[in-house]
Amino acid sequence: MKYLSEYRNLEATKTLLNELHKITTKPWNIMEICGGQTHGLVKNGILELLPENVRMIHGPGCPVCVTPLNLIDKAIELLEQGVIVCSFGDMIRVPGSKKSLLEAKALGGDLRILYSPIEAVSIAKNNPDKEVVFFAVGFETTAPANALSVLHAEKEGVENYSILVSHVLVPPAMEAILDDELCTIDGFLAAGHVCAIMGIQEYYPLVEKYKIPMVVTGFEPLDLVQGIYMTVKQLEAGKYKLENQYARAVKEEGNTSAINVIKTIFEVGSREWRGIGEIPNSGYVLKEAYKKYDAETKFGIENIKVPENSKCIAGEILRGIKKPHDCSEFGKTCKPSNPLGAPMVSSEGACAAYYHFSNNTI
Amino acid sequence: MNIENLGFETINLGHGSGGELTRNLLDKIIFKTFSNPYLDQKHDGSIVQIDGKMAISTDSFVITPIFFKGGDIGALAVHGTVNDVAMCGAIPKYLSLAFIIEEGMKVSEFVQVVESVKKAADKSGVLIITGDTKVVERGKGDKIFINTTGFGAMHPKANISVQNINEGDVILVNGFIAQHGMAIMSEREGLEFESTIESDSTNLNYLVNDLLDEFGDKIKLFRDPTRGGLGTVLHELANDVSVGVDLKEIDIPLEKQVAAACEMLGLDPMYVANEGVFLTVVDASIKYEVLVLMQNHSKGKNAAIIGEITDEHPNKVVMQSLIGGKRIVSPLVGEQLPRIC
């Protein structure tokens, strides 16, 4: 707990905020990649403490928000086929094209909320006459545990376990955002947890190619303010480099054993992002040798396709082109109790974060 | 209670049939445990005397697991309703007690629940005066559901109403928040984690009574933030009276282990359930006296002043974060869901 109190230190944060105000002379748009960072910024009221010239743009790093609609429909289809579907908690309220997983559960589906995919393998072992699927969503952060569950099932000879994969990667999403002609981003707070797994080496080429500062940043108030400060300092000096604010958790090479687990069962492939569309080489797919753990092929649900809700501007929100209250539906037809799109569901989603915590919106 | 002499080990549908088996269950367990002059009449209902105004509250309890650190469904069913009656400014006197049991429940577990009800009722100073027992088929219940209705005599000095709340009134809580919800969460299937967090389930009626004895109508409101947690209750309060609420995060009593568990699961303690916590809104002139009285009571050792009522930002609860920023505390929608990462 030491880190928590240290990095929520009022005096240290205030001092750094004062420094930030002093060094900021021009308007800068900084995108925090990770939904956890968005949550931290809004929950701690940091946005209103920043200099007027520093505008935070909320990035696509909310795993729930970028999981495409048809994946949710696929999970619901599995529930309706009598499969035990296991999921992380905040996926279950995201609306699919007709209903959410939670509603499918109310109609009789066997849905289990878990923290660890390994638990799903135990459920499969304990229910040998049932099929069990883990809804494997998320960025590089959740990939090692999901991969490990497959290796675990293989080792234990559990045949009735598979995963519904929707793994996405951060660097290709950053490139897609930077390539967008509407992009106004001057600097990035890179996602601390993702880098804790993957390391930071893959970000050097991005910094060079787009000549843009990036600071790998943590999630506590002091982390966030420090990350923003380091980014602005580079921008004001006309520099662009990769810096690591979150060095207490992030090593240059990342967590090599976690990376090895990922590489054993996954390979990089094309992935669809909710609201953004298909991005080449932007996610993980199961390797050929592990295809028998792929729920999509196992249950023949590859072809479920559904259009996004046309009123929801999640795509523009996730690319940082619009803010939640630029949306005509925000807080009106779209609320946490009746979300039109995923960013209103997850506590890491930009829309939900604004709705719950921000003064500007109500 | 010696369950070996009961002659049955599990509860079956026959125990809810109204016949011999039902009589057996009632006589050997229920009536024996709760024996009192009202119940012993074994009538269809009980006739009691309550003079003056009465507060009545009912609640159903459907918790999983039924036994948890710091309590069980039986104690919870008493405390929950006793506290709801107390929150009205009343002195709880009587409880009704209705069980819906799922066929196949072990008698040993049922007896454990019944004995826990008895203990909690004795501790709260209430009598069980009427009840009901039904048995449903396996799969149609979750071991056991309990409904209790509480009856209390209004405290002569009480004038509890949201309408009495004014700008400048002060909000206090009697202790650490989020204990109950996190204790349950730590034992729930699929989410288990090692902790020594205990539910705070307890009766609050004596502390409430002491506060009313001492401060009368300067106490404007009592509320127990059970489901939905402190955040949701404060939000309701702000909306019911069209006032604003100002809070400081640093003042909200939160035990370290609970804070860490919330952090780990990605849950906000402001929305986690409590079973032994109440908030009170009081006239600013008595805030420190109220605080001292609470802190000197066994149910209020960790009491704290957490905020105040303001005319600014009506209908909104605004919390100042540890680092000085401000955020809106909005109501909880649905169940709080653990985050992905």
Image (cartoon, rainbow, N blue to C red):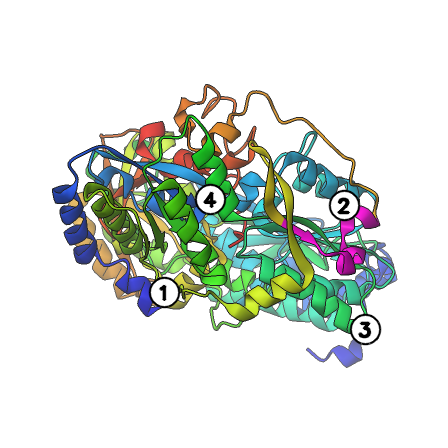
| Residue A320 visible somewhere in the drawing | yes
Residue tagged by mark 4? A348
Disc 4 chain ID: A
Q: Is residue A115 visible?
A: no
Instruction: Specify the label residue B255 is tagged with.
Output: 1
- Of helix, strand and loop, which one carries label 1? loop
* Local secondary structure at mark 3: loop
| Residue marked by disc 3 | B9
The structure residue drawn at horizontal position 33% and vertical position 44%, both measured from the top left corner, is: A41
Q: Position of residue B9 (x, y in %)?
A: 81, 73
Which is nearer the N-term, disc 3 or disc 1?
3
Closer to us: B68 or A290? A290
Give the answer, above or below, for where B296 lies relative to A331.
below
- As drawn, the label of residue A109 is 2
Q: Chain of mark 3?
A: B
Pointer 3 and pointer 4: residues touching (CB < 8 Å)? no
What amino acid is labelled 3 in the image? Glu
Q: Which dot, 2 or 1, sits closer to the camera?
A: 2
Residue type at mark 2 is: Gly
Badge 2: chain ID: A
The CA distance from mark 1 to mark 4 is 25 Å
User: What residue do we see at 34% from left, 42% from top?
Assistant: A211
CA distance separating discs 3 and 4: 49 Å
Q: How far apart are the alpha carbons under marks 3 and 1? A: 41 Å
Place of residue B56 in the rendered image (x, y in percent of width and height, measured from the top left): 51, 43
* Same chain shared by disc 2 and disc 1: no
Contact (Cβ within 8 Å) of mark 1 with mark 4: no
- Position of residue B99 in the picture relative to residue A291 (left or right): left
**In this picture, which residue range is highlighted in magenta?**
A284-298
The label number, if any, that marks residue B111 in the structure image: none
Query: Which element is circle 2 on?
Result: loop
Give left or right: position of A222 versus B278.
left
